[in-house]
Image (cartoon, helix red, strand yellow):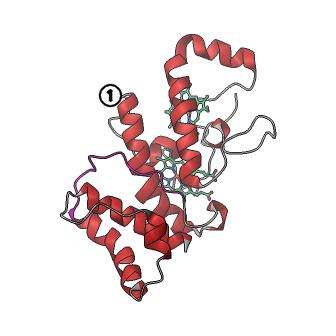
Amino acid sequence: MLELSALALSAMLVVTACGSKTQPPPPTEVQATSPDPTTATTATTATTAPAATTATTAPPAVPAPLTPPPKPWHDLSDDEKKAHMKDVIMPAMKQRFQAFDGEEFAKFTCATCHGANARDVKFEMPNPELTKLPETREGFEKLAQTKQKALDFMGQVVMPDMATMLGEPPFDPATNKGFSCYNCHTKQ
Ligand code: HEC
Ligand code: HEC
């Protein structure tokens, strides 16, 4: 059910983004739960849409949706993880990093997060090639003297949006659990 609704949603957003003549998308729940006899049709549409998209769409003019995976991240197979990275995380993060600094991130690829040797290390994160982060308040205060803008972008955009797209809770200092800076960056 969840899987269907995520697919249906992304298919609908794609349709909207293309400016096709279809009606504005109805609320997703309606689409996903309506007990109509065309379930098979819906499923077919949903699964074929991404292929058609790849072939025909230009870069989206609307913000890329922050779609969570159809099941918990850690239950996805390697292929499912790669597909989610490519179809959801790449477009959304590329938009965000380029809006933050179009020059530095003019080239934005899997390697921007995973490193030049991504394939050799099987896309393992965190990536020691990224800027190493401090673990103390003093360390962050020092970093903020030169990198405040990057810290804001990371804390307000990259970390929470990435958590959403992985379907993980964002880091919670109270429990010390959740998706955090250190899922991407290693520690100093
Ligand atoms: C914005 C940063 C970012 C980009 C860009 C990105 N990834 Fe990821 N990727 C991550 C993070 C973070 C994780 C780890 C998620 C977790 O388990 O906490 C991850 C995990 C993965 C995994 C699972 C690794 C494992 O050990 O289970 C694969 C496979 C993967 N990415 C492939 C890709 C591919 C292929 C691309 C390019 C199409 C890509 N990624 C682009 C951040 C990124
Ligand atoms: C999804 C992966 C990801 C997450 C989560 C993430 N970052 Fe980043 N961060 C990057 C990438 C990619 C870059 C650009 C490459 C670089 O400068 O290391 C970057 C750059 C930075 C920079 C700029 C470094 C420089 O020298 O210009 C700082 C500072 C930073 N991150 C801090 C943080 C903090 C603090 C958090 C948590 C609030 C965080 N990051 C979360 C991927 C991530």
Quadrant containing the N terminus is bottom right
User: Which residue is drawn at the image coordinates 49% and 67% (left, top)?
Assistant: 29
Front residue of this view, candidates 86 and 152: 152
Residue 53 drawn above or below residue 37 = above
Q: Is 42 on the left-hand or right-hand side of 137?
A: left
Q: Is 27 on the left-hand or right-hand side of 157?
A: left
Residue closest to the far right:
175
User: Residue 24 sits in which quadrant?
Assistant: bottom left
Residue 64 rendering spot, x and y as whole percentages? 38, 49
Q: Is 156 on the left-hand or right-hand side of 53?
A: right
User: Residue 10 sits in which quadrant?
Assistant: bottom left
Residue 38 drawn above or below residue 164 = below
Q: Main secondary structure of the magenta part?
A: loop
Is 64 part of what is drawn in magenta?
A: yes
Residue 40 rendering spot, x and y as whole percentages? 41, 87
Number of on-image labels: 1
Quadrant containing the C terminus is top right
Q: Is 55 on the left-hand or right-hand side of 141?
A: left
Which residue is tagged 1? 103
Residue 167 drawn above or below residue 162 = below
User: Which residue is drawn at the image coordinates 28% and 64% (left, top)?
Assistant: 54
Front residue of this view, candidates 131 and 16: 16
Residue 115 rendering spot, x and y as whole percentages? 51, 44
Is 29 part of what is drawn in magenta?
A: no
User: Which residue is drawn at the image coordinates 32% and 28% (left, top)?
Assistant: 103
Q: Which span is picked out in magenta? A: 56-68
User: Which residue is drawn at the image coordinates 34% and 64% (left, top)?
Assistant: 12
The amino acid on which the numbered mark 1 sits, given as a three-letter code, is Glu
User: Residue 68 sits in which quadrant?
Assistant: bottom right
Q: Secondary structure at mark 1?
A: loop
